[in-house]
Amino acid sequence: MEVIVAEQVAQKVGDELSMIKAAQAGDKDALRELVEKYGKTVYGFSYRVCRNEEAAEDTLQEAFLSILKSLQSFDFKSSFSTWIYRVVSNSCLMKFRKEKRDRWTSFETMAATQENLPTDFNAWPDSPLDVVSANELKVAMDEAILNLPPTYRLAFVLKDLEGLKIEEVAASLEISIPAAKARIRRARLFLREELQHFMEHE
């Protein structure tokens, strides 16, 4: 059974690589297949970062334009999904640079020194969505995530909402693994502080 599964995975990977190479060569059918295959992934990621359907739709369009323009630069050294997260993350950062930065002042003040980081931050649920049940809490969670500075928000979404491994988060954001861990740690701390009222009543 394990051999059969391994063969199926290898075939699936091989088919995807062939599709990517064909798309890089200008095959329109292959390009369409890639868009269809990763459309939901890109939209889902965009929505989790933007917390808004309209903004996610705009980001989706911009991200796919970036993906198509940058497709030739994919060198097969990483997985295609990790490369896509990298392109979409860069697209999101470009979009965020147009936003006002004053909304993130509270976060930067809180995260200014490592001494402010408690040692028990791991008490935060592995997936914050596990505690988001009531609509009021969901609204608060959306607002708290939007209050995260873009670089921290992307790291948090990639790790805790998209479920990527820490190595994949670092590769997607083109930073070191320790830097990725630090961003996720600070983001979790900020969100826990923002949602403490709800946590106390769980």
Image: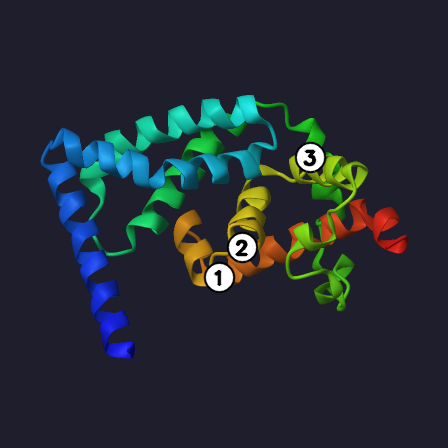
Mark 2 → mark 3, Cα distance in angstroms: 20 Å
Q: Are marks 1 and 2 in contact (CB under 8 Å)?
A: yes
Count residues near mark 1 (Cα–Cα under 10 Å), then give few for <14, some for 14-19, many for 20+: some
Label number found at residue 159: 2
- Image point 70% across, 30% down: which residue? 103
Which element type, helix, strand or loop, lies under badge 3?
helix
Q: Is residue 54 above or below residue 178?
A: above
Task: Please state the horizontal and vertical placement of residue 110, each as a whole percent of the image.
Answer: 76, 47
Q: Residues within 10 Å of mark 3 (few under 14, many from 20)?
A: some
Q: Nearer the viewer, residue 102 or 34?
A: 34
Which residue is the site of mark 1? Answer: 166
Rendered location of residue 166, percent (x, y): 48, 61
Q: Quadrant of the N terminus?
A: bottom left
Lateral position of residue 28 relative to residue 198, left or right: left
Which callout, 3 or 1, points to the residue nearer the camera?
Answer: 1
- Say which amino acid is labelled 2: Lys
Which residue is disc 3 drawn over? 104
